[in-house]
Amino acid sequence: MEQLKILVVDDEARMRKLVKDFLTVKGFRVLEAGDGEEAVDIFFAQKDIALLILDVMMPKMDGWQVVKTIRQHSRVPIIMLTARGEERDELQGFDLGVDEYISKPFSPKILVARVEAILRRSGTAAGDALEVGGIRIDKAAHQVTIDGTPVELSYKEFELLTYFAENQGMALSREKILNNVWNYDYFGDARTIDTHVKKLRSKMGEKGDYIKTIWGMGYKFEVNA
Amino acid sequence: MEQLKILVVDDEARMRKLVKDFLTVKGFRVLEAGDGEEAVDIFFAQKDIALLILDVMMPKMDGWQVVKTIRQHSRVPIIMLTARGEERDELQGFDLGVDEYISKPFSPKILVARVEAILRRSGTAAGDALEVGGIRIDKAAHQVTIDGTPVELSYKEFELLTYFAENQGMALSREKILNNVWNYDYFGDARTIDTHVKKLRSKMGEKGDYIKTIWGMGYKFEVNA
DNA sequence: CGGAACTGTGAAAACTCTGTGAAAATGTGG
DNA sequence: CCACATTTTCACAGAGTTTTCACAGTTCCG
């Protein structure tokens, strides 16, 4: 089974180690960053970070800035660590799009429990399949069913649909899609995405409409409201 | 906009009312249940509850049992309220599939913030957005809603409105607008801005008046006081 | 008041982007 | 090396967007 990657960002190495040890025991792969800039760099270099644990107080770029930067491009779950349980901070965090908020000192067990709860909820957790609007994506089995009926998708089609489903509601530019579904250094024509979208839409039947075109921009996966 | 339904379960009516009031203000529709059995009944009768807020201590059927029962059929997000911040309880809750855990006494603001964070994450509610005078601009989704109703904007219109909203109250010369919304090296007619403003105003209905003309100068975005 | 300068507006022209089908390239397993 | 499936490229038509333009309407200021 693939290990989920968690990025732990804190300027104190001791704190990182503490968190890392507990998460490693639970089977996660833990990456570390010592400040906000490093965190952003690592996050965008690795394209498959499943969760971020982020200290607020850091040199160069504090936790809030990191959240802002990352939220412009990704919905990855974020847990914030902060020194005191000040309500104002916490509220600010939720506004920015922080998923969870844990105040130091915390029990490592609680941390682990929350990490697992968040991953379970976001559908990333191992074994769990991602399901959106009747479309069920089983990453482990590399298999998609729509309203219970299996759909045959090629490799790229599967990757593309998964990327869409994991970023539902977000406007995705062709460039972004290329960087995430294709390799980082892909030099081909961006229009190849259009072709794949066409095939996906046709294979998805009426649910193909969930993939919307944003004119002049790219695509968006959205379940009809 | 459709209102999301939240089911609040607590045996104390006063507590339910407190929570209900705060959530109602935020635009949610709140249902109440006074014990676990009632909660389960209501949950399965109503098909579209978006979130559960659940007290642990309750007559007939306690919070844990409710979670177990519901988790057999649904992944609806669940927030647990508990009297004391005992770690054991919290851990047990996460294992059962509780998404969030808030210990009494809590600040209603925090509760509301967590509700919104969870709904945002589960994709049910909108992400972080810029909101000015009933005009909501979700850059990530590349989508604008006015008083909850989605508005179809073209790419340039979206860019222009975003620029206005981000600089509300400031007088913006045509030159400035061109440099920011169009490319730096744009050589066309500045009057094209007028045309876009016209279309924006018409698409924005009565809120189109927020875009004011500054004679001999340019435009200004300002919400009526 | 009257002219000059500026903005609003509707329609047409110019342009850009997307959907599509088919062909070419690439990969895969026998 | 060949059949087969997948992925990428390409070109064109059609759809949608942006820009231009001409004229009408407003505002400014002596």
Image: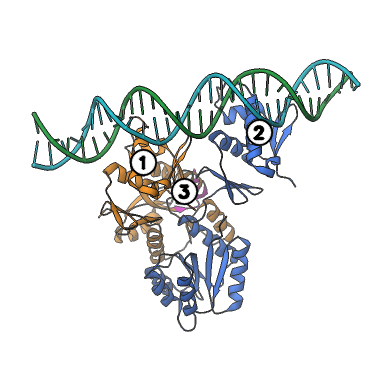
Chain colours: A orange, B blue, C cyan, D green
Above or below for B74 versus D1: below
Circle 3: residue type? Gly
Residue A47 in sight in this render: no
In this view, the mark in front (1 or 3): 3
The magenta segment: A54-67
Query: Which x, y percent locates residue A168?
Result: 43, 49
Of residue A220 and residue A198, the one placed in the foreground of this image is A198
Query: Which x, y percent locates residue B210?
Result: 70, 41
Question: Is A194 left, or right, of C29 in this rendering?
Answer: right
Secondary structure of the residue carrying numbered label 2: helix
Above or below for A164 versus B34: above
Circle 1: residue type? Asn
Q: Residue A127: which quarter of the image? A: bottom left
Q: Is residue B33 magenta?
A: no
Query: Which x, y percent locates residue B25?
Result: 63, 62
Real-space Cα distance between discs 1 and 3? 16 Å
Mark 2: few, some, or many residues within 10 Å (few <14, many ≥20)? some
Circle 2: residue type? Lys
Say yes or no: labels 1 and 2 on the same chain.
no
Of residue A30 and residue B182, the one placed in the foreground of this image is B182
Of residue B181 and residue A48, the one placed in the foreground of this image is B181
What is the chain identity of the residue bearing mark 3? A
Query: Which x, y percent locates residue A158?
Result: 30, 46
Real-space Cα distance between discs 1 and 2? 38 Å
In this view, the mark in front (1 or 2): 2
Q: Which mark is residue A180?
A: 1
Query: Which residue is label 3 attached to?
Result: A169
Query: Which residue is label 2 attached to?
Result: B198
Q: Residue A42: which quarter of the image? A: top left
Residue located at (59% from left, 50% from top):
B149
